[in-house]
Structure formats: C-alpha cells, structure tokens
Amino acid sequence: MGKMFAGLEILGTLGQGGMGVVYKARDPGVDRVVALKVLTEQTSADARERFKREVTLTSKLRHPNIVRLYKVGQVKGRLFLCMDYVEGKTMKELVAEGASQPEMVVCLQKVVTRSTMRMNRASSIGI
C-alpha cells in the first residue's frame, strides 16, 4: 500500500510545477483512480487564491470533455483537489517514443479541440 493523503492512496507522481504536485492516486472508498493536485506548503497567498478560483470555476462546469472534481480540501495547511484521472501520454513521452510528426499533430489537434470545447462551455455558463 502506498502513502496516504486526504484518504487517498498515492500511486505515483504525474507532474509538478511551481505551485504543487499532481499525483495519480486511488480512492479506496469507491475503488477509483483519480488525479490529486496538492499545493506546496510554500505556495504564495496569490497562488492559493488562484487555486481556489480554479476550484470554484471548475466545479460549475459540466461537460464530457471536462474533468469532474470529487473532493476539495486542506490537510495540514496544504490545499488539494481530487479530480478525474485521464489516461494518456504526454508530448514528452510521445517524442521519446519516436512518434512521427503526423502522430503528434493529431495529438495536439485533439488537445486544442478539447480545450476549445471547454472554453466554449465555460463561456456559455458565464465563466
């Protein structure tokens, strides 16, 4: 069994940036694999406010191409959100595997299409 955070079993790290880390995790209560975004303890007040806005806005969106939020909270001063985990490869992985340019173009096209659909959906509900 892996390390636990907010009742979720951490399965591995998906990525990290200036604000925090995104983990692949499992919610044992419903046996569901999720993505868990956790802010670092050193995250600035401004970044914490952006995170809270992200949570508020994302929670209002309902669309098949937008991840669902399952759980939001704070553990020992660290804000977190638990959302759908979407299986797939990163561009870095595709390049490392020697993906052809057409394959990468198709992948990017899908990302842009999904992002556009999400922005249109957000706009339609006033976000």
Image: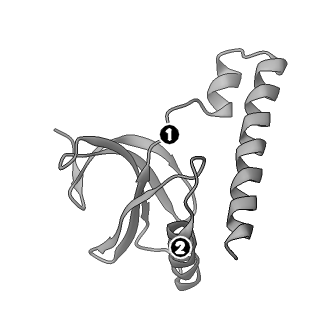
Image-quadrant location for residue 61: bottom right
Along the line of sight, the residue nearer the viewer: 110 or 78? 110
What x and y, as percent, mark residue 8? Answer: 25, 52
Query: What residue appears at the point 50 percent right and 74 percent down from the top-left corner?
Result: 43
Query: What residue appears at the point 33 percent right and 45 percent down from the top-left corner?
Result: 25
Q: Is residue 53 left or right of residue 3?
A: right
Image-quadrant location for residue 19: bottom right
The crowd level at tag 1 (other Cα within 10 Å; few <14, some 14-19, many 20+) is few
Image depth: mark 2 or mark 1 in front:
1
Classify 33 as above or below 79. Answer: above
Question: SS class of the residue under badge 2?
Answer: helix
Q: Which residue is mark 2?
A: 51
Question: SS class of the residue under badge 1?
Answer: loop
| Marks 2,1: beta carbons within 8 A | no
Tell me the kind of residue under disc 1.
Answer: Val
What x and y, as percent, mark residue 40? Answer: 43, 67
Query: What residue appears at the point 78 percent right and 26 percent down from the top-left corner?
Result: 106
Q: Is residue 61 left or right of residue 84?
A: right
Q: Is residue 104 left or right of residue 15?
A: right
What x and y, as percent, mark residue 14? Answer: 47, 42
Q: Which residue is mark 1?
A: 86
Q: CA distance from mark 2 to mark 1?
A: 20 Å
Query: What residue appears at the point 77 percent right and 52 percent down from the top-left corner?
Result: 116
What x and y, as percent, mark residue 50? Answer: 58, 77
Q: Earlier in the sequence, mark 2 or mark 1?
A: 2
The crowd level at tag 2 (other Cα within 10 Å; few <14, some 14-19, many 20+) is some
